[in-house]
Amino acid sequence: MFFNNQIVLITGASSGIGEALSYAFSKQNATLLLCARNEQELLRVKSNITTRCEIFVCDITNYLSVDVMISSILLKYQKIDVLVNNAGMSQRALAFETEFRVDEKIMNLNYLATVYLTKKVLPVMISQKKGNIIVISSISGKFGFWQRSAYAASKHALQGFFETLQIELREYNINTLLVCPGGVKTNISKNALGKDGTPHGTMEALQLKGMSPESLAMKVLHASARGKKQLLAGQAEVFLYYIKKWFPWLFFKIVENVKGR
Ligand SMILES: NC(=O)c1ccc[n+]([C@@H]2O[C@H](COP(=O)([O-])OP(=O)(O)OC[C@H]3O[C@@H](n4cnc5c(N)ncnc54)[C@H](OP(=O)(O)O)[C@@H]3O)[C@@H](O)[C@H]2O)c1
């Protein structure tokens, strides 16, 4: 088991993909450090975990809380072997209707908070000369799509940041895996922000018909253990990535006709 006895910090562990990743790492006998804002949901996830596990109620956009979380982890465990940057939220509103504070909120969580946390963990991994960073980006980090301007922008930003880290960290034996899933069956579309910042509240077909978080989690662990740098996972959305790459004119013809569905 590749992650046996490793210390794994997962953000957004209270639901969806983060929850499934927590169970997958637990099956590998890892020690789980679960971070999210909702304490009840974190406790529920923890109750399903059989290996050593601790919860951290932390809003990662609150940098002081992140500092406190990392300090207490290092005091107790002295190391972090795996950082899973998973916490994030999506958007469902046209760009010209979306209030700027919504753009800020999505960018703050999906991009800036992820970078802040990573920069807190990197010195530890560099001194260990060992580590795995897993970033749950999105296929929206590869192309723009209806009603996801801020979301796609934040995930494109992650691509730029972590691709650079992949290059810079090679000599420190730290692998960075950028995960770009298409639709996954979670509450992401329900929790997505509308134009005024209120939750969209709708479970969309992309999620309902999407892959299970458990099957994505298995692929993620497998890819990270093998030192892969990128994982594209999904159905038709992944084909769109290749269509954009090789036939950009066809990509725009297809997505312009989707009209936000
Ligand atoms: N589902 C999909 O179709 C899909 C596709 C591609 C990529 N993704 C990405 O996968 C990741 C996980 O999403 P999901 O699908 O599992 O959706 P989800 O069920 O809504 O999970 C989002 C997680 O992020 C946490 N979170 C939100 N704001 C936070 C904050 N300020 N501080 C700490 N944690 C926070 C939430 O926990 P609390 O509310 O308890 O804080 C929750 O655990 C996201 O980055 C998303 O962009 C999802």
Image (cartoon, rainbow, N blue to C red):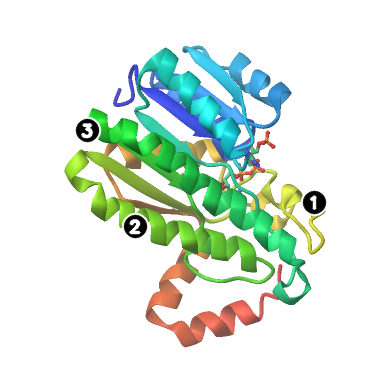
Q: Amino acid at mark 1?
A: Pro
The residue beneath circle 1 is: 199
Nearest the viewer among 181 and 76 is 76
Which sits earlier in the primary sequence, circle 3 or circle 1?
A: 3
Q: Is residue 12 visible?
A: no
- Crowding near the residue tagged with mark 3, few <14, some 14–19, many ≥20 C-alpha atoms within 10 Å: few
| Residue under the image location 25 percent in, 28 percent down | 128
| Residue under the image location 47 percent in, 12 percent down | 52
Q: Which mark is residue 163?
A: 2
Residue 21, percent from left and from top: 50, 32
- Crowding near the residue tagged with mark 2, few <14, some 14–19, many ≥20 C-alpha atoms within 10 Å: some
Nearest the viewer among 123 and 57 is 123
Q: Is residue 73 visible?
A: yes
Residue 232, percent from left and from top: 42, 55
What is the CA distance from the residue labelled 3 to the residue labelled 2?
Answer: 19 Å
Which sits earlier in the primary sequence, circle 3 or circle 2?
A: 3
What is the CA distance from the residue labelled 3 to the residue labelled 1?
Answer: 42 Å
Task: Classify residue 68 by image quadrant.
Answer: top right
